[in-house]
Amino acid sequence: MDIDTIKNFTIKDYHKVYKNKEASPIEITQFFLDRIHLLDSSLRAFLTIDETGALQRARELEEKKLGEADLPPLYGIPMAIKDNICIQGLPTTCGSRILSNYRSPFDATVIEKIKKAGGIFLGKTNMDEFAMGSSTENSGFGPTRNPFDPSRVPGGSSGGSAASVAALEAPLALGSDTGGSVRQPAAFCGIVGLRPTYGRVSRYGLISFASSLDQIGTLTRNVQDTLTLFTVISGQDNRDSTCAPYPPFSFSDDLPENEIKKMKVGVAKEYFNPGVDPVITQRIQEILKILTNEGFEIIEVSLPHTDYALEAYYIVAPAEASSNLARYDGIAYGYRCSHPLNLQDLYTRTRTTGFGKETLRRIILGTYCLSSGYYDEFYLKGMQVRTLVKKDFEDCFEKCDILLTPVTPHLPFKFGEKSHDPYQMYLADVFTIPSAMAGIPALSLNCGYHQHLPIGLQVLGAPFQEGKILSFATFLEKTLSVPPPVIKSVNLKKEVL
């Protein structure tokens, strides 16, 4: 197998190769491990590479000698896993030095399901510390680089997972999305990223940032693989009290084209403003013309509270982070400062040296919002705005089936370009945060390139309507025929080292 052969493969293609005895799970796994060894010293998508475990798992799958009809849905498919999702025996650092010595004693629910489905884990991927960031510059272990241009960021916080799939270090990956952390890096890396409805996928074994917002999502090279992976990881879990009482997702991939074309496509005017790169606006307008020519009905809608979602998010999310991250105090697990003078000194020095600057900023902000006298003024008002944002989407989906928006207001930016101004960095998620606040499903799809950099299109749907999103995205992917990323090397110029 070589990259030119494998670049367009879907999961079904890998299974066809296995059934025809053209390659084995060991050979495919070794192909991706070789890609990691070739590229990752420059790319830095992975924090942990489990070569021994991956090859052992591939060997076990081969020895089962399953019949053609018995192949589980992810049989022999190597995967990359974001480093805030627990895999038993492997490090789970959340991109933070405060968890640098932590190895998970258990598997997350999604990991159990993937193992049962025949998946193989290549390792754990880099991320912004505790998923707090939009560029993977906030990792405690150094940044990941964008495979298209290593002087630019891959997005965040799931930047390592997105970069690994774009560079074909893995065909599939899992990430987590709190305010856009799957969709934004998917857009920056030219792949498909799905954030399911909040509660559609169990969060058991996902280390928390903001519990009412966090959701595990998928990163793949095509919509068909998104569908397969989402089907595997979705479904109710009694160990997660926030998991919705829904069975695993089921989808028929032979939905007639004429049924898809009956969908009403909404376009929200608030998502097309002077702050959006004209290149992105122009490309989406071109796509709307294509859809009109294909017979789709395009409807202009309004989401009037969109402008308030970003501010509300940066009250709600830091407040929940402040509560969740209080457990990292140097007592139970994780990093502990050396030779503390007393308990107060232990807490102070452990947290000051263990957490990075952005994480400390959000903890302090969240603690302030939850403090006596300010809870009602800040956190409660933030939750009230969240309700208004959610109501906007509910009203919108009474008029249309799906919404189309940009994923980001700009193309991938250069390292250091926004890190000096936190607010400018937060604006990178301005189009993904509203849907996260509302808990609705959303998908990022590569819809084209500008000067070799990918452009992302966001498809939004009503709660638990992933089927509509995936149907539409499948049609659009076929119609646009945008080629997937092909990264043969990562050339680091001296100025970006």
Image (cartoon, rainbow, N blue to C red):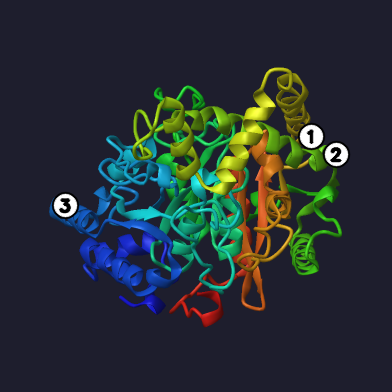
Query: Could you say whether the residue bearing mark 3 is in a helix, strand or loop?
Result: helix
Residue 189: x and y, percent? 56, 64
Residue 185: x and y, percent? 57, 57
Q: Are marks 3 and 1 in contact (CB under 8 Å)?
A: no
**Mark 3, residues whose alpha carbon is within 10 Å: few (<14), some, or many (≥20)?**
some
Give the residue type that dot 1 points to: Asp
Marks 2/3: CA distance? 54 Å
Residue corresponding to mark 3: 60
Residue corresponding to mark 1: 392
- In the image, is residue 449 above or below residue 332? below
Q: Is residue 251 visible?
A: no
Marks 3/1: CA distance? 50 Å
Give the residue type that dot 3 points to: Glu
Q: Which mark is residue 304?
A: 2
Q: Which label's residue is closer to the chain start, 3 or 1? A: 3
- In the image, is residue 398 above or below residue 271? above
Which residue is located at x 67 percent, y 29 percent? 368
Is residue 101 left or right of 201 when viewed as pictured? left
